Image (spheres, grey):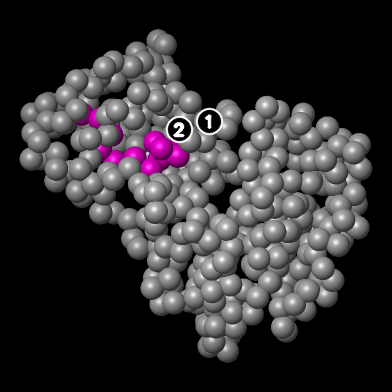
Amino acid sequence: MIKKIKVSSFRSQYESSDGRRLCVFTAKVSEIPTEWEEWRDVNVRDTKKRSDVFNAIVDTLKNDPEEMIFRNLGITIVSPNVEFDNKTNTVTVEFSDKAIHGIANGGHTFSAIQHSLLAGPVNAQVKVECIVGEIDPKWLVDIIDGRNRSRAVQTESLENLAKSYDSIKRVLANQPYNDRIAYSEFELDDRNKRKDVSIREILSYIYCLDDFDRNKHPIEAYSSKGAVVDYYANEDEKGKKRHTYILERASKILPDILELRDVIYRDLPKAYNIDAGGSFGKLTTMGVVVHENNPHPLKFIDSATIYTYPDAFIYPVLAAFRKHIDHRAWSWKEKPLVVWEKRKADIASAMKDVVGTFSGNPNKMGKSGLAWRTCYDAI
């Protein structure tokens, strides 16, 4: 198989005495050939399982696409021939033997890219490293094994082993989405499919509603879910593990939090259109996609929406509800869905003002204290 790829950059990095070459190029994720899916057998350790790693990459592609090239290690391929045409900025990649050619590392990245593109265009770049030349299969095994051993065990996996999330598991045990939550890396469901909700995401929603005042906003819930995992894994200033008192108390209202998240996600576009006089479906530069004839199911409630859009819209709104929580007992001062019905018009109007400020850059909006404070004041 021979594929031509339009690239943003290309560099030859090294050539050995026996003619093997190492080169690297960057390209738009949409340029990565879908046909490479059939060329993954070369990585004997690639189980093609979609895990928490997959979820994290999808999250970056959806909410922070311009950071993809910096956060992600990319894809490594093995090819008998890679040629660069500097007149057309085109790279020609050849695969001929599935036993020794194809994706040697970065299978999760490849899968996440293909998955994300199904939802619409993605403005992201990815790095592709190329090992080129005659390949000895024994040498190739060592290369693949070494490259696939580079990841450390994630904190959430260790915390799950330490039973730090048991209070969450107990509360969510009877929820219809329980079997879809991955509490550590590489968790699959009964059908051998990836679990599509990470404990990182669950913790980020709790963090949104933690005890932060008007002047300190839980922006890390959106911008750095890894930092949120570490926050609850670490000790506070008194030397007490946060999961032993925050997560155990917060777990009591976690089903309400997850329901609220989905209700906001479903209803915000309608409120934006009707109450705020906007046109949510036209916010394409903010990552909004309309699926008129193919509504997407929500994560935690039995409902669907024709809109998909970045989490930058949701987190500041959800976090505003923290003022309605008694954090000593982690109980609601007022039912959250009642508050939402009362205030969603004001929230939608506030969001419209925020969108006008950050038009074309949802990630910047999600990281801006202005967006979080505006939503906080609207409730």
Residue 25, quarter of the rendered image: top left
**Is disc 1 in contact with disc 2, using a CB cutoff of under 8 Å?**
yes
| Residue 308, disc | none
Is residue 277 something that shows in the picture?
A: yes
| Residue 118, disc | 1
Residue 97, quarter of the rendered image: top left
Mark 1–mark 2 distance (CA, rounded to whole Å): 7 Å
Which structural element holds mark 2?
helix
264 displayed left or right of 249: right
Q: Is residue 104 magenta?
A: yes
Highlighted magenta segment, given as a residue range: 101-113
352 displayed left or right of 367: right
Name the residue type under label 1.
Leu
161 displayed left or right of 17: right
Is residue 13 something that shows in the picture?
A: no
317 displayed left or right of 83: right
Which structural element holds mark 1?
loop
Location of mark 2 (residue)? 114
Q: Is residue 39 above or below residue 182?
A: above
Quadrant in the picture for the N terminus: top left
Name the residue type under label 2.
Gln
What residue lies at 72% left-to-right and 48% top-to-bottom? Answer: 265
Q: Which residue is at the front of the view, 287 or 216?
A: 287
